[in-house]
Amino acid sequence: MIETPRLILKPLSLDELIKHIKSPDELTKDLGLKPSRSLRDKETQEAILDDLLPNLSKPGKDYLFNTMWIIIEKNKKTIVGGICFHGEPDSNGEVEIGYGTDDDFRNFGYMSETISALIQWAKINKKIKTIKAETDKSNISSIRVLEKNNFVKIKENDSTIIMKFKIMN
């Protein structure tokens, strides 16, 4: 787990991820938390089923890079969103992240705080040299979150922007 002044970033185990798919309410009840709507959306569920679960169940995979990390607001005991890696670092030490914040918790700095904490964790991890994120050009809030964390735009097409953060170890 990663902890910030307001948040806990908790990577879900294989069993927790499976439970999340089968019954998100049961998982949040087991964890003593209020549920998240964003982790239930169709796109997130498909990513868990199609990408995270198959990779997480393979022997030798580092589960921290192959699971959903839930973002918990400590005082409210509420899941405010989620973040995940798109697999383990490649041979150059590059990883990609994907993230989402529940509508009710946007514009409170939760995702900026989350990504900042993840960067600090990456510096200790030593496997990661670069963190990449791709976001819709129209998602100004997501772009601002990345800019606040010193990501720089490296590529742009008609619909998306790719931004990177280089880890200075």
Image (spheres, helix red, strand yellow):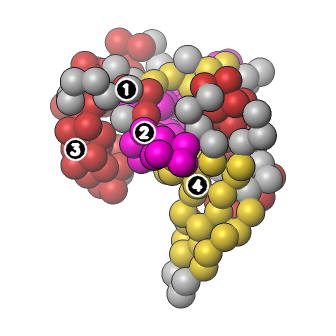
Q: State the residue lying farthest toward the front.
A: 91
Give the label on residue 49, or none: 3
Is residue 109 left or right of 72 when viewed as pictured?
right
Task: Determine whether label 1 and label 3 are within 8 Å by CB.
Answer: no
Is residue 152 left or right of 57 when viewed as pictured?
right
Q: Secondary structure at mark 2?
A: loop
Mark 2 vs mark 3: in front: 2
Question: How far is disc 1 from disc 4 in space, using C-alphas?
Answer: 19 Å
Q: Earlier in the sequence, mark 4 or mark 2?
A: 2
Q: Nearer the viewer, residue 141 or 66?
A: 66
Question: How far is disc 1 from disc 2 in space, using C-alphas?
Answer: 9 Å
Residue under circle 1? Answer: 63
The magenta stretch spans which residues?
A: 67-94
Dot 4: few (<14), some (14–19), or many (≥20) neighbours within 10 Å? Answer: many
Q: Earlier in the sequence, mark 3 or mark 4?
A: 3
Check disc 2 and give the amino acid type.
Glu
Mark 1 vs mark 3: in front: 1
Residue 151 seen in the figure: yes
Check disc 1 and give the amino acid type.
Tyr
Give the label on residue 137, or none: none
Residue drawn at (38%, 26%) of the image: 62
Q: Earlier in the sequence, mark 1 or mark 3?
A: 3
